Image (cartoon, rainbow, N blue to C red):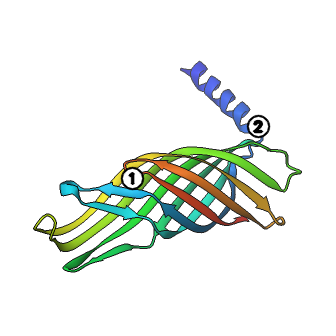
């Protein structure tokens, strides 16, 4: 037992003595422009999220070529009016992406990256209308989760040692497939 404990202490000391760069490098946000998000509900009803939203994110500098980027998106409600009522879709998204930096040299004031990661979409659907086509009344109030994945690319352009501009485009592979373009600003910590 003592040998195992001594081995663990020595390994911890060796690993702990190495310099580590992993830390949150920056945070910020921007706008999110989404298109193509569509969810088909029972009875032929479909709801969409083709809307404008807001993005909040942080960049965790894992190493010179990899960043881990969690982000949260909130989309403004998408409302459709009918003669006999309306429906409203409000969407949120949480993404955990890995950015692989294609030009990691520190002398460049820009970075180009490809991204991939996990996605969880959350849609609040409220529908209260009468359909003449289906001759029925709809009273729907549900919160739906849609897990999926992200693939895309982006770039970051540093203006000085305090902030940078970013822009990325990604495709969300989920039950509600959509293309999202997100420009914004990041502030270095």
- Count neighbours of disc 2 (C-alpha within 10 A) and say few if under 14, some if 14 to 19, many if 20 or more: few
Asked if disc 1 and disc 2 are in contact, CB closer than 8 Å, the reply is no
Residue position marked by numbered label 2 in the rendering: 18
The residue closer to the viewer here, 56 or 134, is 134
Q: Is residue 5 visible in this depiction of the protein?
A: yes
Q: Position of residue 179 (x, y in %)?
A: 51, 55
Q: What number is the disc on residue 176? A: 1
The residue closer to the viewer here, 157 or 96, is 157
The residue closer to the viewer here, 108 or 63, is 108
The residue closer to the viewer here, 57 or 31, is 31
Of callouts 1 and 2, the N-terminal one = 2
Location of the C terminus (image quadrant): bottom right
The quarter of the displayed image where residue 166 is located: bottom right
- Count neighbours of disc 1 (C-alpha within 10 A) and say few if under 14, some if 14 to 19, many if 20 or more: some
User: Does 127 sit left or right of 88 as displayed?
Assistant: left
Residue visible at 24% across and 60% down in the picture: 45
């Amino acid at each position: 037992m003592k040998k195992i404990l001594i081995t663990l202490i020595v390994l911890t000391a060796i690993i702990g003595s190495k310099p580590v760069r992993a830390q949150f490098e920056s945070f910020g946000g921007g706008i999110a422009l989404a298109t193509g998000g569509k969810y088909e509900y029972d009875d032929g009803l479909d709801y969409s999220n083709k809307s404008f939203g807001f993005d909040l994110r942080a960049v965790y500098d894992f190493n010179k070529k990899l960043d881990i980027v969690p982000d949260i998106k909130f989309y403004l409600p998408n409302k459709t009016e009918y003669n006999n009522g309306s429906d409203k879709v409000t969407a949120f998204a949480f993404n955990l992406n890995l950015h692989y930096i294609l030009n990691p040299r520190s002398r460049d004031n820009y970075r180009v990256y490809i991204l991939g990661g996990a996605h969880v979409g959350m849609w609040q659907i409220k529908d209260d209308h009468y359909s003449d086509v289906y001759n029925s009344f709809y009273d729907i109030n549900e919160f739906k989760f849609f897990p999926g994945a992200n693939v895309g690319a982006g770039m970051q352009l540093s203006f000085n040692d305090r902030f940078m501009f970013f822009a990325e485009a990604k495709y969300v592979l989920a039950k509600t497939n959509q293309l999202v373009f997100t420009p914004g600003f990041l502030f270095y910590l």
